[in-house]
Image (tube, rainbow, N blue to C red):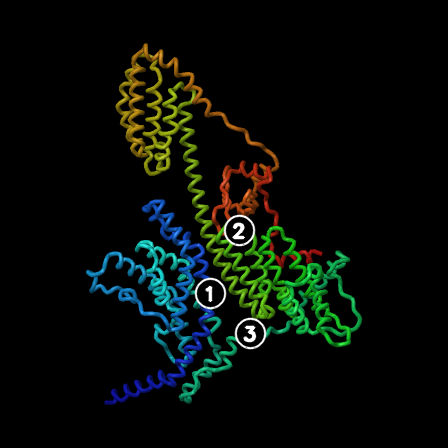
């Protein structure tokens, strides 16, 4: 009875905890999800958009070797279909996910809402079983990989709603719901089962794999502060009631930006100021000369920010001549227009120097010849908001970890060497434009906005770099394999030419050895370590074939040739079978060879026939030894010493293309774009020719970040 009493109390207590103001919990849940949804979609939508833009490429990668089972025409049509509908896939999928947050999602059909019911297996086709298994596997894999993050998100949602726990189904971001939403979208497409499964896997590799990062970002930006959590826990323990179980100040703190604290100039910043003064003297007169003004009355920093904000609003309409003026002079002019006082005021020394530092950096960006015009124009729009956010933040120029400096450096780095005809590069350019758009709004005048965007863009850039590195690694391995094959071909051809050198052979035999038997020898050579006897047999058969078509010196040698013919013919047939040589062509060759052997065995016919054919055959063999001499000049030396990682600008009728030297050996080179994909595969001598003709130019640029480049110039004085 005591146990029943205790159990009853426990049940009542649990009901009290879970039913404290249930109407309020429902409203609170809607409010919390309303705050979380924009943060989730900020990252999730970007991942979906990035994937859909290259859906055909990623689909092909996931399809792998199964591509070989498809007809080329069918495979091409499939990729074209995916390219056409990629916009619909993105829109429909994001709409489904949005419905999950809003609670408007429809229940899926039986068999799609959960694991397969194996008690009804006889009623379900093999394709349905296979597809359901693939879907379930993706869900379980995501749940396993992001288990800790999901637990944290569920705790966060429960706490924000004033509950101790929530059911997993109440979390709209769980892999189960996100994957099932995708299934609803994909089911309506004109794809067979194999294609649908491949598309699911492509989404898993490019979108669902990023859920851990997205969950982490949500935890960082939405998780409540520890002191506030302790207050709520203490409140629960000491005075449980129907009161609201969250702290208003705590939520406001999570969504409202914290104003940046004004820093005091450090010794390192004072050193920069001294170097700036030396620079002004060295470049006098220039737009960076100190503005002379009488009096000791200075504009406040909030007034300067206000002037910059007004300038930003009318910046697009400014006259060209006005934009060429120094930033600080434009600011001072605007301050004079906005001021209604009679006192003449000026910029404080630290503020004037900060504006000059910013202007110097953007002047360097404007003069850079390696940045595409569209990207350059976008980044240059950040001059005014960056100047506003920099006021009082002196660590921008003394600390490489400063978010303002980091974001500008990352945007510049991301914009370098972009090729307009590459989809990935266009996506990067669009992402840069998106970041610039955020920073040119009013929020971009605050340090907090730069901190948020710096973290997001840095994460985006790191993922792009990792993906490019993976593609580069595959491209490098492909070239290594390709060159190993080329090296094997060279060994084979050398072996053939050495065997024929100085010998008078029929033209048909020379062509057979070079065009056909070379394939047999290559197959044997590439597997020489595994089957060394096959290489020896193939080389011996080539030697015997050469001997068999040369006129015998006497009857004894003629008998020896007749003796080796059966084994030779058998070995030739075996070798040709290994390379699947065309059977009709094979029959013609052995018929001609038999005729040739009959002629050789007849002394009179052999003398007459060989006299007519030896000259042409000898020329054919010896002509292979003629080689062109390479031109040696400055361009060839540049191509020879070009180091891996160097960038080259290739010029063609379609425009300029940037290529990074990923791999080279003594003869060949592979250039890739910023996304790691192949741009140009060429020989060292061909690159030298392009350099010589002006179709290519080696890039001589600084490897330093843009802010470090400017500051290094100052510190060198």
User: Of residues 140 and 131, which is closer to you in this image?
Assistant: 131
Question: Can residue 41 be seen here?
Answer: yes
Above-or-below relation of 471 to 324: above
Q: Earlier in the sequence, mark 2 or mark 1?
A: 1
User: Of residues 566 and 158, which is closer to you in this image?
Assistant: 158
Above-or-below relation of 310 to 685: below
Residue 690, horizontal then vertical, whole percent: 57, 38
| Marker count (numbered) | 3
In the rendered image, which residue does mark 3 sit on? 257
Tell me whether circle 1 and circle 3 mark residues in contact (CB < 8 Å).
Answer: no
* Figure quadrant of residue 414: bottom right
The answer to whether 110 appears left or right of 454 in the picture is: left
In the rendered image, which residue does mark 1 sit on? 43
Tell me whether circle 2 and circle 1 mark residues in contact (CB < 8 Å).
Answer: no
Dot 1 crowding, Cα within 10 Å, few <14, some 14–19, many 20+: some
- The quarter of the rendered structure image containing the C terminus is bottom right
Residue 102, horizontal then vertical, whole percent: 40, 73
């Amino acid at each position: 009875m005591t146990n029943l009493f205790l159990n009853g109390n426990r049940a009542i207590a649990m009901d009290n905890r879970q039913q404290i103001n249930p109407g309020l919990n429902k409203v609170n849940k809607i409010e919390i999800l309303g705050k979380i949804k924009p943060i989730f979609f900020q990252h999730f939508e970007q991942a979906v958009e990035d994937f859909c833009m290259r859906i055909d490429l990623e689909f092909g990668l996931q399809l792998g070797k199964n591509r070989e089972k498809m007809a080329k025409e069918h495979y091409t049509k499939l990729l074209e279909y995916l390219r056409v509908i990629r916009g619909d896939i993105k829109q429909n999928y994001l709409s489904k996910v949005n419905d999950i947050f809003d609670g408007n999602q429809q229940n899926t059909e039986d068999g799609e809402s959960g694991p397969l019911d194996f008690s009804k297996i006889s009623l379900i086709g093999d394709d349905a079983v296979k597809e359901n298994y693939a879907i379930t596997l993706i869900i379980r894999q995501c749940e396993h990989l992001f288990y800790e993050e999901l637990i944290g998100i569920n705790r966060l949602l429960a706490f924000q709603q004033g509950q101790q726990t929530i059911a997993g189904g109440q979390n709209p971001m769980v892999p189960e719901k996100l994957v099932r939403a995708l299934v609803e979208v994909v089911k309506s497409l004109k794809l067979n089962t194999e294609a649908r499964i491949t598309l699911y896997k492509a989404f898993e590799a490019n979108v669902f794999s990023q859920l851990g990062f997205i969950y982490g970002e949500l935890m960082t930006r939405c998780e409540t502060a520890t002191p506030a959590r302790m207050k709520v826990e203490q409140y629960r323990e000491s005075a449980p009631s129907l009161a609201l179980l969250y702290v208003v100040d705590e939520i406001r703190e999570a969504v409202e930006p914290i104003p940046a604290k004004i820093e005091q100039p450090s010794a390192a910043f004072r050193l920069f100021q001294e170097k700036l003064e030396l620079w002004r003297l060295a470049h006098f007169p220039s737009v960076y000369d100190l503005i002379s003004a009488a009096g000791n009355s200075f504009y406040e920093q909030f007034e300067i920010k206000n002037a910059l904000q007004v300038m930003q609003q009318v910046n697009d309409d400014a006259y060209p001549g006005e934009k060429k003026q120094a930033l600080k002079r434009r600011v001072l002019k605007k301050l004079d227009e906005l001021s209604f006082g009679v006192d003449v005021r000026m910029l404080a020394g630290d503020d004037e120097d900060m504006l000059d530092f910013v202007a110097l950096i953007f002047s360097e960006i404007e003069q850079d010849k390696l940045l595409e015009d569209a990207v350059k124009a976008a980044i240059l729009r950040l001059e005014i908001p960056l100047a506003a956010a920099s006021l009082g933040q002196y660590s921008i120029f003394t600390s490489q970890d400063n978010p303002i400096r980091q974001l500008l450096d990352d945007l510049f780095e991301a914009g370098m060497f972009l090729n307009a005809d590459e989809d990935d590069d266009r996506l990067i350019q669009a992402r840069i434009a998106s970041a610039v758009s955020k920073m040119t709004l009013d929020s971009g005048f605050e340090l907090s906005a730069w901190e948020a965007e710096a973290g997001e863009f840095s994460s985006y850039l790191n993922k792009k770099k990792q993906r490019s590195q993976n593609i580069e690694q595959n491209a490098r391995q492909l070239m290594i394999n390709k060159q190993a094959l080329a090296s094997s071909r060279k060994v084979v051809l050398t072996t053939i030419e050495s065997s024929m050198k100085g010998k008078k052979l029929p033209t048909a035999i020379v062509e057979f050895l070079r065009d056909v038997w070379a394939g047999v020898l290559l197959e044997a050579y590439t597997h020489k370590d595994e089957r060394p006897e096959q290489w020896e047999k193939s080389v011996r058969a080539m030697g015997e074939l050469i001997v068999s078509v040369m006129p015998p010196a006497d009857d004894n040698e003629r008998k020896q040739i007749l003796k080796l013919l059966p084994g030779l013919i058998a070995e030739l047939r075996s070798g040709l079978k290994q390379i699947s040589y065309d059977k009709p062509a094979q029959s013609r060759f052995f018929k001609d060879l038999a005729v040739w052997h009959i002629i050789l065995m007849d002394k009179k016919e052999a003398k007459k026939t060989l006299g007519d054919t030896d000259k042409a055959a000898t020329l054919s063999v010896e002509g292979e030894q003629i080689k062109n001499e390479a031109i040696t000049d400055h361009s060839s030396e540049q191509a020879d010493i070009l180091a891996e990682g160097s960038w080259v600008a290739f010029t063609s009728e379609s425009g300029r293309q940037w290529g990074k030297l990923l791999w080279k050996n003594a003869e060949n080179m592979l250039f890739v774009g910023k996304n790691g994909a192949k741009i140009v595969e060429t020989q060292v001598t061909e690159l030298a020719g392009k350099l010589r003709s002006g179709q290519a130019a080696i890039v001589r640029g600084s490897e330093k970040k843009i802010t470090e480049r400017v500051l290094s110039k100052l510190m060198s004085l």
